[in-house]
Image (cartoon, coloured by chain):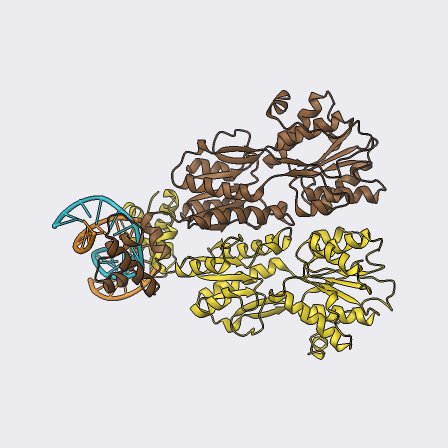
Chain colours: A yellow, B brown, C orange, D cyan
Amino acid sequence: MVDLKELARRLGLSMTTVSRALNGYPDVSAKTRERVVRMARELGYTPNALARRLTVGRSETVGFVPQAMEPYFGNPYFADLLAGMGEALYRAGFDLVLAGLHDDVDPLAACRRLVAERRVDAIVLDRTYEDDPRVEYLLLRGFPFVTLGRDRWAQRHAWLDSDGRRATLALTRALIAAGHRRIAFIAADMRFNFVADRVEGYREALAWAGIAPDPLLLRHEGFSERGGAAATSALLALAAPPTAILCIEDLTAIGAMRALRAAGLEPGRDVAVVGYNDIPLAAATEPPLSTFRMPVREAGRRLAEVALALAAGADAAAFRELWMPRFIARGSHHWRGARGPLNLDLSPEAAGVAR
Amino acid sequence: MVDLKELARRLGLSMTTVSRALNGYPDVSAKTRERVVRMARELGYTPNALARRLTVGRSETVGFVPQAMEPYFGNPYFADLLAGMGEALYRAGFDLVLAGLHDDVDPLAACRRLVAERRVDAIVLDRTYEDDPRVEYLLLRGFPFVTLGRDRWAQRHAWLDSDGRRATLALTRALIAAGHRRIAFIAADMRFNFVADRVEGYREALAWAGIAPDPLLLRHEGFSERGGAAATSALLALAAPPTAILCIEDLTAIGAMRALRAAGLEPGRDVAVVGYNDIPLAAATEPPLSTFRMPVREAGRRLAEVALALAAGADAAAFRELWMPRFIARGSHHWRGARGPLNLDLSPEAAGVAR
DNA sequence: TTGTATGCGTTATCAT
DNA sequence: ATGATAACGCATACAA
């Protein structure tokens, strides 16, 4: 492995000049630069990233620290998000490191290590909790980070989020307008901000319509197909079962549809079912699943871009983006009691009404 | 941020002594060590990983480079593998970096960069191709790496693999013994070694039974639910449709079952269907999917351990492990024409017979 | 048991 | 336009 010193020796130049030529500094003659570049290629010279990183004081690395792995299993979302991030980071010459992916280590500990040892220049957090320890720690340290999903303060750090509240609000209102009165929501652990956000939209729509929320219709085992099925069975056992079921994820909805069938009910006819995320499987269910789509790959790219900007010293205040998911109307949201087709109003005005 | 020099100054000791005390060297008095450790904690000293890495000449990092992302989407396999690797690496103080996760960059280019710039100490490769460029490159460079999935030479590098050939061989033989004669395999791109390996087992079983392989029964669009469904529709349109369908993945099998139903056939009765991997969804299909289970999380852990050993200079020859997946007999492998229950012989002897 | 001095491979500063 | 030298923050060979 030839290093800079060796390369400079062979060229009869100083390391300084060679380094400058290679890094595209202006103050080096075209002729010299050409010589240097050619020789570097011939000898297969590649700078040692470890040395460069120490010198420039940057690790050229962005860390990704999830809160929990459970929601990721079987979820294409995960691969898509990583692919998006990986793409943007690769372009910038940065590495993507994953930390805290297993349950036996506190995600906070993983964060601490990344920050304290300067292993990364910025961090991307996914699926934050309310009062997330990772967020509090990074805020305290003043370390650059961006979250996918905002928290209730929303003004303390950079974030990117899909407007789950608005989507759920619009959906619930549309269901009510179509005649539904018993609307269930198979959500998940409310500590997740994105879950709380969606539940909020659901509740606002009910309140707006003057429907008293029935706590029995809100469930929290929605992070798996199995959970969706179990929750649905429980809902069907109610004295007054729901006519519509909102789900925190598509897999949840798939489980819900399975349980409905098992109970002799036809999803998309006897009961309306709606998922979230639009995983590939969603188009292939029977009936095809109506759901919301968020461009996850692009979100990953954008998160990486923001992380890079923050690492370069940009102000976090500049990076707060609320993306609107699109409703994908397929078959499962239908209901024989409906007064007409489902008509979602995703406009900001409609969302504001309920606030 | 206090560094080693500052810490030493405050203690009235040399950097050397402080460094040794912190790194657990024996030749430092207990009293001194205690003082050093206490002060380090008080001042919140944490060594700078970049500096340490440059000094010791190791990046303390392992890279993971997939061949393609397509097979990962919607596959819990991916998250599980990463979680396993992340766990073992975290314990060792190593970082896990992901590279080449997007389609617009050649995985080989990602490998090159990791190696040439010394960004990682070892690499884990998943789902290798036959004559995989990544493998050839790393072999050429003499760079430490381990693959999940072996290639046809099998003796050139460290690997860990599930014995897909043997599993498929045993399954196909058992199906034949049960009376099946038209057995289809919805495989995938044969450039993937694990696909070719499984197809080999399938063919061996047919040959062993004297059944001429029908090329129409071997399909290659199995990397998605949709592909599984499409392949099945094509198979059903055959003059002589299959009575059993092997699938490269569970999602494929789910698609196959969907297409069977759409054609008025009942999987697990009219046609036997078997998946691979045992994703959570597999237990929740109707009928529940019979499949093979590989402990992916542990495989991830083991891959990381091997990578760490190789990075530390261990000989690759010591790391060749063939794991046997377990057959999970649920409902979908049944067939009304069967002469009896399916009886798999996964013993090495049974696998050897056909060789 | 502790300290001195050197090196890791770059980039950056300051001359020339 | 080019070069000598310092600095990045640590670990380690060698000395004491």
Residue drawn at x 21%, y 62% as measured from the top left = B12
Please indicate, yes or no, whether residue B273 appears anywhere in the rendered image. Answer: yes
Whether residue A30 is visible to the viewer of this picture, yes or no, is no
Quadrant of the frame with the C terminus of chain A:
bottom right
Q: Nearer the viewer, residue B152 or B161?
A: B161
Give the x, y percent position of residue B26.
Answer: 27, 47
- Vertically, is B23 above or below A111? above
Residue at coordinates 42% horizontally, 57% vertically from top-left?
A: A119
Image quadrant occupied by the N terminus of chain A: top left
Q: Nearer the viewer, residue A210 or A345?
A: A210
x and y, in percent, of residue A321 in the image: 59, 69
Left or right: where does residue A347 sit relative to residue A6?
right
A191 is higher (above) or lower (below) than A54: below
Residue B114 in the image: state x and y as whole percent: 45, 47
Q: Nearer the viewer, residue A188 or B266?
A: A188
Closer to the camera in the image, A139 or A46: A139
Residue at position x 72%, y 44% in the image: B227
Q: Is residue A101 left or right of residue A277?
A: left
Is the residue A233 above or below the residue B153 in the image? Answer: below
